Image: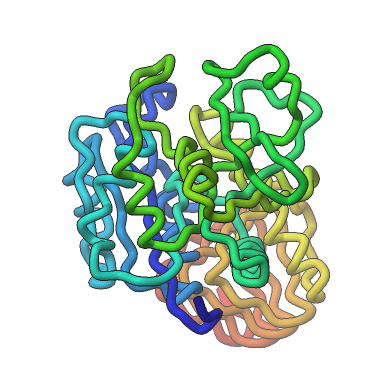
Amino acid sequence: MSAQTKPAVVVLAAGKGTRMLSPLPKVLHHIKSRPLLAYSLDLARHLRADPVVVVVGYQAELVRAAFAHDPLLTFALQEPQLGTGHAVMSAAGALKNFNGPVFILNGDVPGLKLATLQTMRQIHESQKNALTVLAMRLPDPGAYGRMLTQGDKLLRIVEFRDATMEQRAISLVNAGIYLARSAELLASLSELTTDNDQKEYYLTDVAADFRRRGLKAAAVEIPAANSFEVMGINDRRELAEAQAIMRDRINEAWLRAGVTFMDPPSTFIEASVRLDRDVRLWPGVILTGRTVVGEGAEIGPYCHLDNCRVAPGAKVPGHQACSGREFEGNAD
């Protein structure tokens, strides 16, 4: 498998998200004005993936409609929804003519970084793994699936509900991101059963099957400090927490690039926005879309600029809500 081979990406996006207490599918809830699913699809684009398969289920037509503008996507319907393994089985038809590495991502994990997937693939390639699973070590591993390893080999993944007390004491847990050779993955999916506590097809069971067939499976550990990257969104509290972390991540990068924030916690900037040095942002500023702010410009308090252009040195008065506007000089 060459590092130059384009991967396939399967994004699991079929769940209802019961704890969101909303008729809207979980992956269509927003962080920073974008659906959760959009962040995983961004990663697929940056990986130059082809195909990109989105597994839909609950309110499938709403999810399809939200991303109908993207011609690169293939949608696979999971109906009924019988577990994570069954979700990937639903994508098997779209992968049958693909011969390369397959990433399996989740549509409710907006914090994952491209660099993490690139590192994961480098290790996968260099170790000649057939399966690589992202893992993390937590002091309180809770209900995560436990990773059973031997040296650098992944023996199996045990879901919490099926784990013994001894296995539950393991602190290395499954982060839910997979990279596998396509042919071997499809073969393992055909061997999955529902012989478990939840009577579902567990994707985690492919690790033991790879091992049984003499194929190398390994875990790649993400530092505990980066555990937010693989944090799934299950309720409104977690949605708000993720939004705050992503806001802080973007704001810190701009602070390091020479932008002044009068009140960083109240300032929201989308990743698509571009700022030059010495920009000054007052409290409550929201910058979205393709907004560009020139060097030395100042944005007054409680402005929301969407797809706007602010000339170098311009001063935008507070309490503006604009879309597609250009601000020149001392704007008013």
Q: Is residue 276 above or below residue 53?
A: below
* x 71%, y 64%: residue: 281
Q: Is residue 237 visible?
A: yes
Q: Is residue 139 above or below residue 277?
A: above
Front residue of this view, candidates 237 and 138: 138
Count of numbered marks:
0
In the figure, residue 44 lies in which quadrant? bottom left
Front residue of this view, candidates 50 and 204: 204
Is residue 218 rendered to the left or right of residue 104?
A: right
The C terminus appears in which quarter of the rendering?
bottom right
Front residue of this view, candidates 6 and 69: 6
Q: Is residue 115 visible?
A: no
Front residue of this view, candidates 164 and 234: 164
* x 29%, y 43%: residue: 190
In the figure, residue 117 lies in which quadrant? bottom right
Q: Is residue 163 above or below residue 103?
A: above
Image coords of residue 7 (percent x, y):
43, 71
Is residue 258 rendered to the left or right of residue 155?
A: right
* x 53%, y 51%: residue: 214
Is residue 50 rendered to the left or right of residue 47?
A: left
Q: Is residue 293 above or below residue 116?
A: below
* x 68%, y 53%: residue: 220
Image coords of residue 163 (percent x, y):
59, 18
Image coords of residue 246 (percent x, y):
64, 52
